[in-house]
Amino acid sequence: MTPNRLPLLYGMPLLLFIASLLQSTVAVRLVVRGVKPDLVLIIVVIGSLVYGGKAGMLWAFLGGIGLDLFSGGPLGISSLGLMPAALVASLGHRVLSRYHLFVPLGASALGTLIYGLIYVGLVAFLREASQTPLFGGITLPIYQLPFWATLQDVIVPATVYNTTIVLFMTPLLNRVPEVQEI
Amino acid sequence: MIRNTERRPRTLGDIGVRFIIFTLAALLLMALQLTGQLQSLRSAISFFMAPAQLGTTGAARSVTDAIEFLLELSTLRQRVNELEEINAALLAENFSLREVERENGEMRSLFQFAQTRPGLELRGAQIIARVIGQESTNFLDYIEVDLGATHNIDVGMPVVTEQGLVGRISEVNNVTSKVLLITDPSSAVNAILQSSRLNGIIQGTPNGDLLMDFIPQGPVFNVGEVVLTSSMGVLFPKGIPIGQVIERRQRDIDIFQQAVVRPSIDFSSLELVAIVTNFDRQENEAEPVLQPTPDPAVTQGTLVVTPSITTVITTVTTPVTTTP
């Protein structure tokens, strides 16, 4: 690994942690149609686009942990949603050209959808699991997210919001030169 | 150019391997947290993070206030040019005082709230918890406050403001706690319509509104009615305002009616809340069950009261992380 990439590798977790903090404190003031921007998701998607899936996977894991530290949800659930989103976004690193406008927009839209659907799916799984004897003796918290209402009122608006933010970031993103996967 | 087609052995760097490892790590963390094994670690993290959260929240609030203030200022200047110089001198002082005054006002209101409800013990000087953070994801509705186990805060304690019900404590760390808001879809609160005395259950929805469900068919209620916590539940003290009915949903084929309720609290701008520490759940349980009764002002000519319909409302479990 070349030395100039080390700051990125170590700086990114710090950036993700700050983004998580801002997500729980500042993002609430940027709410549009009931949803706030997913700062961590946007950073992970852009990071995966620029630097590839291997680093993106690590950042998705750490970013998800950061998010869950400031959330009432179970620890790790955001990581499980963000990692597939990073995986999809990383396709834009080599398979597609990230300099094409639709690649970052598509990565952001797909990433948000995948993250949201996995989050809702895991919540539903936990809810079912809490009612089965599989976890006998252990009291699991019960979370509830009605699928269609969450899709309509949260996931779709968040997809539009995040994609719009990435659209405005595209000129900046295009200035970053092509780099090898780290 | 000779292309090297030799397959590289799988290493930790491979995306697939990383994916599996991190997935397993996330699942392990989730399992540990859900079973309460990470409670002390989370307490330690929240101890260090609370000041940062409080600082960032305060900074964000100040920036928002400053922007709003500057917007007001530009309008003001157009109107009163001759007072511009005096205004400029007072602005700086005013800006800092506004924050103090607003906080003072909220504390006074909370104090009045406590005085009108002597049955509820609101924790003295520290009683008023500062909201230090909001939920980080779009899916759930929680807030974090700066009181925790060291302040004798416990899971399940109701959280209120002078405007109404906020939610209840769902997770307690040493110096911070998480509050499950009533707008979260996992939340369920036994409620009563103030005028028509109809009981139901208030549930959160993903769009931030509240839905009052399980209202018996038959009796009529009106848009605009105030919704209060009822004595049927054991989770919250009765008589705390929840919101106001903005839409009535009634279909003959349904067993129950529904009401869309607008919360009495603007949850996005919550800054101070009060935690009810001595709420005796037995006290609520001992209360007689309120039956639907006609309200002539509400039901002129169209009221059909069916006293035989008694909704049996069971307490719906809401997310609670218990300390082992």
Image (cartoon, coloured by chain):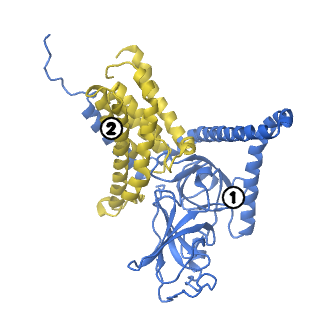
Dot 1: what SS? loop
Residue A136, given in percent of the width and then of the height, sits at 33, 62
Give the colour chain A carries in the figure. yellow
Chain letter, blue: B
Specify the amino acid type for callout 2: Phe
State the SS at label 2: helix
User: How dense is the environment of label 2, judged by Cα within 10 Å: few (below 14), some, or many (20 and up)?
Assistant: many
Q: Pinpoint residue B55: horizontal percent, then vertical percent.
A: 63, 38
Q: Mark 2 or mark 1: name the one nearer the start of the chain.
A: 2
Instruction: Give the residue type that dot 1 points to.
Output: Arg
Can you say which quadrant of the picture contains the N terminus of chain B? top left
Q: Residues within 10 Å of mark 1 (few under 14, many from 20)?
A: some
Residue B303's x, y, as percent?
A: 54, 86
Q: Are marks 2 and 1 on the same chain?
A: yes
Q: Which residue is mark 1?
A: B123
Q: Is residue B312 left or right of residue B55?
A: left
Q: Is residue B36 visible?
A: no
Picture disc at residue B22: 2
Q: Chain of mark 1?
A: B
Which of the pair B113/B211 is nearer the observer? B211
Q: Is residue A155 visible?
A: yes
